Amino acid sequence: MSEFTNKIDFEVLVMVRNANPNGDPLNGNRPRETYDGFGEISDVCIKRKIRNRLQDMGERIFVQSDERSDDACRSLADRAKKNEEMQKALKAKDKESYAKAACETWIDVRSFGQVFAFKGDSVSVGVRGPVSVHSAFSVLPISIDSMQITKSVNSETKEKKSSDTMGMKHKVSSALYAIKGSINHQLAEKTGFSDADAEKIKEALRTLFVNDSSSARPDGSMEVCKVYWWKHNCPMGQYSSAKVHRLIKITAKTDDPKEFEDYDITIDSLPNLELEEIEGI
């Protein structure tokens, strides 16, 4: 496996049209928003989609969705216990070998990290991953449309209530979201994360919403428009991630932008910082 050479920062611009990008279960599944009215997609949601894309690309994933399980394991504990190298390290109480085996087996562990703490195990192991992903926020405050829906079939045969049950469905009519993140060299060395893994993360971001449609996010309603990928010229990076992420400035050309083309995007530069600009799919 190749090594990870230099620090990377990235930003992904996502256009949302008539979709619920990330519902809040504590607020009737309305699209997440800040107190200032800006739309939000949690980092957990984004990493779930990255994992799904990596799995579609043929990579082994530790934190799999139940409906996407490809190894017949019904829990994370089952998946960890099937790994012989990890179990050998567990019996020897060798945390370092345990973490190494996990990182070598699953790309999401060596990317995002993982806490291994299962009932009955003699040790718990924590892995810090090099890939950090921020929550995504909309460029402008969002407008949420809600409509009442009904279902015309009872869930149970002996239900006494009417078969027409009311519910609500919410969507963001149009908004541009920005996902920001970085890949840390020091942590990549510890987990074995490589330049080849970074390329896979880049491709997962470029195709983030492929095979991700649902009633809340119909095909075409979530679109990756641009991926900005900065590679530093030294392992630790010559600039902070905050400084790099400030290079992109987004303003609306109209009072009510509906399409990606309705936004004006300017990109500043920093000396000796390489930028790769990638079209989404």
Image: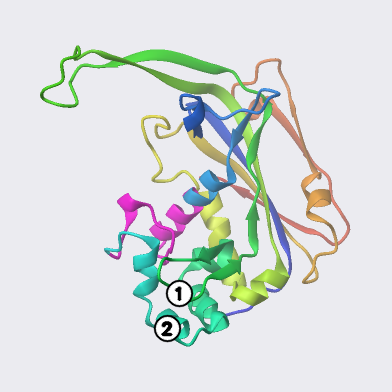
Q: Which residue is mark 1?
A: 105
Q: Residue furthest right?
A: 271
Is residue 170 depicted above or below 16 in this figure?
above
Type of amino acid under label 1: Thr
Q: How many marks?
A: 2
Is residue 78 depicted above or below 30 in this figure?
below
Left or right side of 184 for 159: left
User: Is residue 229 visible to us here?
Assistant: no
Residue placed at 41% from the left, 81% from the top? 87
Residue placed at 37% from the left, 82% from the top? 84
Q: Who is closer to the viewer here, 262 or 255?
A: 255
In which quadrant will I find the N terminus? bottom right
Q: How is the image coloured?
A: rainbow
User: Which percent across, then down, holds residue 9?
Assistant: 71, 56
Which element carries disc 2, helix, strand or loop? helix
The part of the image, by quadrant, that contains residue 13 is top right
Type of amino acid under label 2: Glu
Q: Which residue is mark 2?
A: 85
